[in-house]
Amino acid sequence: MTTSVLLSTEDVLVVGPPTSIEVDLDIGAKGERGSRIFSYEESDPAVGMSAIGQDTIPYDMYVSLDKNNEYLTAYQYVSNFPSQGYTWKKVFNFYPRQYRKNVPIIFNDGIGQKTIIVTEITPLNDLANINAENFSINYSIEYQNPIASSIESISFGPGLDDFLNLTINIKALEYKNESWIPLNSVGEGIIVHFDIRVV
């Protein structure tokens, strides 16, 4: 035995969100602003903030746009612990001013040379204020035998290509057959790990 039931309606009700919502944000007292990031063409954050005309609150950040000094260096206004109050402290540099690469170098009779265009290490704007003594150079030579090496000389100046170059000469000996002999490379050269920073 079966029963047939017919359900029908002439009205369809659609329930949905309102077409618009209004939010009034002007209720209550105005709160203090949060920390912000500021920038100006001045290396001293206190002077730069004064030039901008902005009060400083804890944890504000300031980025120097002074192309002659501390370019793209970020400072933060933090507690001067253990003293009282707050002070600007350098936190990082957007341009790291370093060269970290593994490069092949040809060694001939114990001498290897690497020439680096200085703008690979530091911005063009820094070049007027640095010399060879400003480069901190760390390196290691990747080789199968024990190596004794040192930086023989560093030169800093324009090269034949008119670029400002940093030229590093490395003197190296390898321990082979129970004696120290000048290092000589075969093929494309010996890998040297460089970590060069501007100080």
Image (cartoon, rainbow, N blue to C red):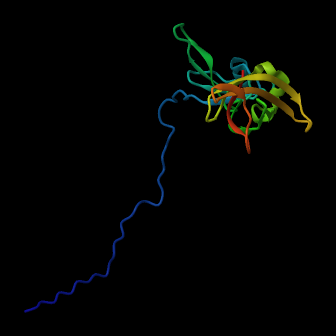
Which residue is located at x 77 percent, y 20 percent?
Answer: 134
Residue 164: percent from the left, percent from the top? 86, 32
For the image, the number of numbered tags is: 0
**Picture layout, residue 137 above or below residue 106:** above
**Picture layout, residue 44 above or below residue 188:** above
- Residue 169 appears in which quarter of the rendering? top right
Residue 42: percent from the left, percent from the top? 76, 23
User: For the view shown, which residue lies furthest in the bottom direction?
Assistant: 1
- Residue 6 appears in which quarter of the rendering? bottom left
User: For the view shown, which residue lies furthest in the front direction?
Assistant: 177
Q: State whether residue 69 appears in this view.
A: no
Judge left or right: residue 25 versus residue 100: left
- Residue 195 appears in which quarter of the rendering? top right
Q: State whether residue 25 appears in this view.
A: yes
Q: Nearer the viewer, residue 94 or 2?
A: 94
Q: Nearer the viewer, residue 32 or 112?
A: 112
Judge left or right: residue 31 versus residue 73: left
